[in-house]
Image (spheres, rainbow, N blue to C red):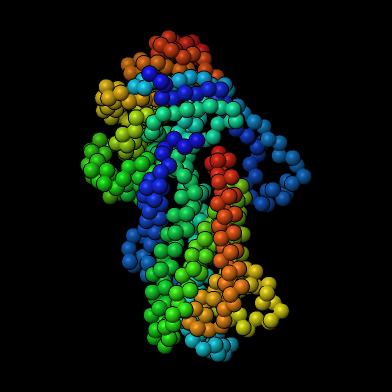
Amino acid sequence: MPPVITVRNLSKTFRLPTERRGTLRERLMKAHVSNERRTRKTLDDINFHIHQGEFFGIIGRNGSGKSTLLKILAGIYRPDKGSEIAINGRIAPMLELGVGFNPELTGRENVFLNATILGLTNREIRARYEEIVHFAELENFMELQVKHYSSGMSVRLAFAVAMQVNAPIMLLDEVLAVGDFVFAEKCFALFERYKKEGKTIVLVTHSAESMKRFADRAMLIHESHIAAIGNPGEVIELYHKLN
Amino acid sequence: MRFIPIDFPYILRLFVALTWTNFKMRYYGSILGYVWTLLKPLALFGVLYFVYTFVFNQKTPHYKPFLLLGIMLWDLFSQATMAGMMGFIGNYQMIRKVYLPRIILVASAVSAAFIGLFFNLIIFALFAFVDGVPLHWRVLWFLPLLIALYLLVMGIGLILSIVVVKVRDMISLWEVAIQLGFWLTPVIYPMSQVPEKLRFYMFINPMSGILTYSRFLLVGIGGLTKSGYCYVIAMSCLIFLLGVFIFTLKEGEMTEDL
């Protein structure tokens, strides 16, 4: 079967100004001082592919570049020139905590907005609304502005929306880090179901346990490079050895 | 690279949803909220009308609808360009977490301000009716002007939304620019009171033409030249295209600088 995600020669370089000059005054006052730009290669020559229906785990320390990788896959950041990415199928991203919720809107309004962004029509959202609220366990809070939500609540809601998008590919970044264990179990049950349905899931996590339990293959990113890719047990062993 | 399929129905749904959201947030989701936002131009209108009629003895016929239309259109210009400017940096939480065609964020912010203008124009129509402004078929020529205004503020909003990522004080600078523009554009006075040799320079600003011609078409004061009318429309389209060009060229880089 052809891979759903193919990544070849992927690099990502960020330009980091030595200091940030965000205002005109700063720019004028320091016009004579050169603001030398350093660059930092957050991802360097990344090559991998993910097959249809695979549960692909990514681990790595903070700052190793795994979140950047997911953002590139989701289309938020542009990779450097020469990188090749081919993706077959729609992606439902669930990056960092809280997804793009607007804090001034109520939970209900955010569900509609977010699901629209992720590609659902109004009719589809209405049909799935109850299920989303139920999964997020927020029946009593949907008319509350999201700014009053706890971080756990907004992540649960964001996750519930992303789960309803029904995209064949899911990108999940640290979703398990916030919910409590009941919610984590719910997510695991859902993962099982999606695996059966043949969905492709890319999960970034620190949890070695859930990685061993679900991942078919795992990838370790260390200092911008792929350090290992393959059997989750072995990859995790290496991860622990490296630190 | 676009991984979420960018098909037209999707773009349209997103545009409508975001415009509606922006609109709701502007007007606090209520009719009363709309009344509050109407208060600002109406209060300004009241004060300026008082000053210009009784203090400066302004004698332009139908000065009431004349002034009100000017203030409403200028208010739209100021609101829409400001909203457009914040369309990108104001949505950074969303931009950094999910891919969506970001130009829609600016477009919907500008469009939400435009919905407000339609309500304002109804109020204006009432004023004009009470003031005895006769209805004329040339009112129809106001529509292309309205579209030009839309494209103009959209273009400016797109350019500003990119500039403001790099230069945050553009927000304050633009506020000053709008304040100066209020006096340097024929908002409260008719073009006919401007010395003749200065008129050409004032008409370079497309807002001058939009205001002057709108007054002629809706209130029947002043005049309209074909070349001027065409200039306003061409200039607005040009600024719009420039805005789209700059935005699409720079949005990727700006996402990382947010």
Locate the N terminus of chain A and report the quarter of the image it occupies: top left
Q: Which residue is nearer to you in this view: B214 or A100?
A: B214
Residue in view at x 32 percent, y 16 percent: A213
Give left or right: position of A145 versus A72.
Answer: left
Image: A222 above or below B201: above
Quadrant of the image occupied by residue A10: top right
Residue in view at x 66 percent, y 77 percent: B199
- Where residue B70 appears, as percent x and y from the top left, is 51, 75
Q: Which residue is nearer to you in this view: A104 or A113?
A: A113
Residue in view at x 43 percent, y 9 percent: A234
Q: Can residue A148 be seen in this view?
A: no
Give left or right: position of A78 versus A231.
Answer: right
Q: Can residue A237 be seen in this view?
A: yes
- Where residue B60 appears, as percent x and y from the top left, is 54, 88
- Where residue A30 appears, as percent x and y from the top left, is 73, 46
Image: B141 above or below B17: below
- Where residue B71 appears, as percent x and y from the top left, is 50, 74
Give left or right: position of B23 versus B67.
Answer: left
